[in-house]
Amino acid sequence: MNFDIVWDSLPRFLSGAVLTVEITAVSLAIGLILAVPLAILRVSLNQLLSLPVQGFTFFFRGTPLLVQLFLVYYGAGQFSDTLRSLGLWVLFRDPWFCGVLTLTLNTAAYTCEILRGGIQAVPHGEVEAARAFGMSGSKLYRRIILPKAARIALPAYSNEVIFLLQATSLVSLITLMDITGVASRVAARSFAFYELYLTAAIFYLVIVYGLQGVFRRIERRLSAHLRERPEGDPAALRG
């Protein structure tokens, strides 16, 4: 075991960890923004609205992420003339953009389905009660359905966040130096595969358990009103 190579490579691993977190955060943020309207369209009774979204989620959930990444990164080269004429080639020749675009579309598809399940799990009685108070359309979604659906979908969404973080390791195949990319680059030169990939695994473990802790706190906060309170608690007496 050669731990000197691990110690010497720590700055590069830290830089790779920053890139991993950055790609994950950007992809999740944009993916979530896309997923909310897609989920609303997905549950629409109008098939002209729901079927295109269903096709989008079917493709991105039914094909390997690696294939999607290669389609965007390498496939864009076949249309370089068209992309240049549209002024988009400067984006598609950048591996960071291609990696984030692929991960964003992938997580948008999964998050859309998670939110769809959450929306459909909102108790019908609560929706009818809101309608009885005069809520409809966007106000009904904004004040009743989406907050309730988000609370229901949070455990499944936390798993999606962790899956996406682990999936970022694929961007090392398009030359990005994330945690896995650093391990691969240094191991190819030093042949210390065990030490370097074990270090990469430890970095992923730290980030994953940090994320799990954050989501656990959010879930506890959102479900605080559902937990039993000890006898004598003034809040319990009021409830």
Image: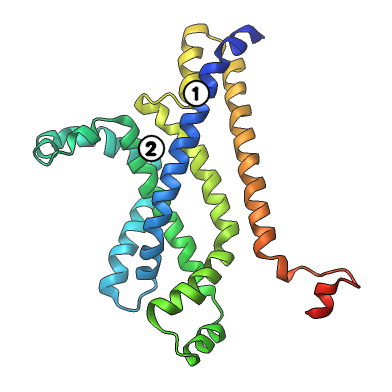
Q: Spatial distance from mark 2 to mark 1, Cα to Cα? A: 23 Å
Q: Quadrant of the N terminus?
A: top right
The percent coordinates of residue 148 (x first, y second) are 55, 71
Residue flagged by tag 2: what amino acid is it? Answer: Leu
The percent coordinates of residue 123 (x first, y second) are 56, 80
Residue 37: quadrant of the picture: bottom left
Which residue is at 47% across, 38% downward?
Answer: 167
Which residue is at 47% across, 42% downward?
Answer: 25
Which mark's residue is nearer the viewer, 2 or 1? 1
Which residue is at 39% across, 70% downward?
Answer: 40
Q: Which mark is residue 66?
A: 2
Is label 2 in a helix, a strand or a loop?
A: helix
Residue flagged by tag 1: what amino acid is it? Answer: Ser
* Left or right of 41, for residue 144: right
Along the polypeptide, which appears first: circle 2 or circle 1? 1
Note whether 115 is above or below 14 in the view shown: below
Of all residues, the one furthest to the right in this rendering is 232
User: How many numbered circles are shown?
Assistant: 2
Q: Quadrant of the C terminus?
A: bottom right
- Badge 2: residue crowd in 10 Å (few <14, some 14–19, many ≥20): few
Q: Which residue is mark 1?
A: 15
